[in-house]
Image: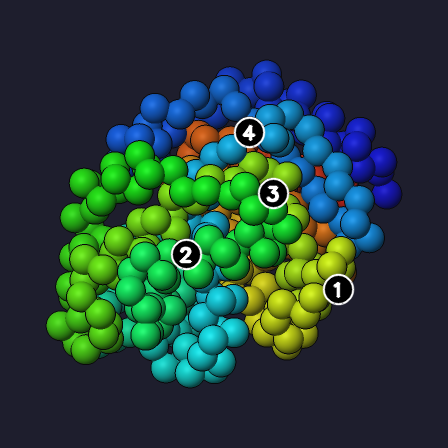
């Protein structure tokens, strides 16, 4: 097995000279302004050591990577009742697709497509005002990261609110089936703020560590979710974490992962490491182009694929 720091340095170098970096997300104007030349990677091992390369200390908009944390939070609050509101099958459709919702009567396929994440937010909001729900999500992520400095980028949240017609359509459609309890603008307000959380690769890798360690934070010893739940969240990440690019990601990388349109990906090597990579340019499906390539290289060289070396 290769030396981890050397592998990360090589990956960061390859990224620095890559010509085709993909395209930064355009549909959220605030994200379209992000400089595409950036690249960072951080690996938090279950023994507590952390290795990084590139722009691993630069904050970025975690966007849909946040859906992993809201799923864990909702499961902690409501248990398996979550699964009556949202399924756990890959969608095979783009992240913001509405087509399956009609056929499946407003119950989203999985918690990682936008419709599913909006349904999860609706569950988290039970008994809360929107501001309290946002606070609870941010607090949960701060707790996982062991870092109180994590904040929301209000410009990104506003930018998404102003251009959120597709997500509003999904939410209204679900509400028409009775699949959402709270007013649509409240649910979307919470969802857009959760997506606008800013984290660095170092923070994100740290926050995902419980998923690499059977649900327990190996640094603090806190049991975040049960062992079975950690296994199941990883299974959903593997099957659904990259939208209609999930099969390709499993084929090339072989690790549970969740991407976001900010260009971040959280990947889990169970029993070994939590990995965060960020490069803002996306492939046509909406997943970080260099981030996916970096994880492919890392998993291969470290022999971390869940399907064997
Ligand atoms: N906030 C984004 C949206 O709802 C999240 C999509 C993503 O990161 O894949 O459109």
Viewer-side label of 2, 1 = 2
Question: In which quadrant of the rendered view does residue 31 lie?
Answer: top left
Identify the secondary structure beneath mark 1: loop
Viewer-side label of 1, 4 = 1
Residue at 36% in and 61% down: 132
Q: In this rendering, is residue 287 above or below 170?
A: above
Residue at 39% in and 74% down: 87
C-alpha gap between disc 1 and disc 4: 27 Å
Res 221 label: 1
C-alpha gap between disc 2 and disc 3: 18 Å
Say which residue label 4 marks.
Answer: 58
Front one among 251 and 203:
203
Res 203 label: 3
Say which residue label 2 marks.
Answer: 135
| Residue 148 in the image, given as x and y percentages of width and height | 56, 46
Query: Which circle's residue, 2 or 4, is located before the other in the chain?
Result: 4
Query: Which circle's residue, 2 or 3, is located before the other in the chain?
Result: 2
Identify the secondary structure beneath mark 2: helix
């Amino acid at each position: 097995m290769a030396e981890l720091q050397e592998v990360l340095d090589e990956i960061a170098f390859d990224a620095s000279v890559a010509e085709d970096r993909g395209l930064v997300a355009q549909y959220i104007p605030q994200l379209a302004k992000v400089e595409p030349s950036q690249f960072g990677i951080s690996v938090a091992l279950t023994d507590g050591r952390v290795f990084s390369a590139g722009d691993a200390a630069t904050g970025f908009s975690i966007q849909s990577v946040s859906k992993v944390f809201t799923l864990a939070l909702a499961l902690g609050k409501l248990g398996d009742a979550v699964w009556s509101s949202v399924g756990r099958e890959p969608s095979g459709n783009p992240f913001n697709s509405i087509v399956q919702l009609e056929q499946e009567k407003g119950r989203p396929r999985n918690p990682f497509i936008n419709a599913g994440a909006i349904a999860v937010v609706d569950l988290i909001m039970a008994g809360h005002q929107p501001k309290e729900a946002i606070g609870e999500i941010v607090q949960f992520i701060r707790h996982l990261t062991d870092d109180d400095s994590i904040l929301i980028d209000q410009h990104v949240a506003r930018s998404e609110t102003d251009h959120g017609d597709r997500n509003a359509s999904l939410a209204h459609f679900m509400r028409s089936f009775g699949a959402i309890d709270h007013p649509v603008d409240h649910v979307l307000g919470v969802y857009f703020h959760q997506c606008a959380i800013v984290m660095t690769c170092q923070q994100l890798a740290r926050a995902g560590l419980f998923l690499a360690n059977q649900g327990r934070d190996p640094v603090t010893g806190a049991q975040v979710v049960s062992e079975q739940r950690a296994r199941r969240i990883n299974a959903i990440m593997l099957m659904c974490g990259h939208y209609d690019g999930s099969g390709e990601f499993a084929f090339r990388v072989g690790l549970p992962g969740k991407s976001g349109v900010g260009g971040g990906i959280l990947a889990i090597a169970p029993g070994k490491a939590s990995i965060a990579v960020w490069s803002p340019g996306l492939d046509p499906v909406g997943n970080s182009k260099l981030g996916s390539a970096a994880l492919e290289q890392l998993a291969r060289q470290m022999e971390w694929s869940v399907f064997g070396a």
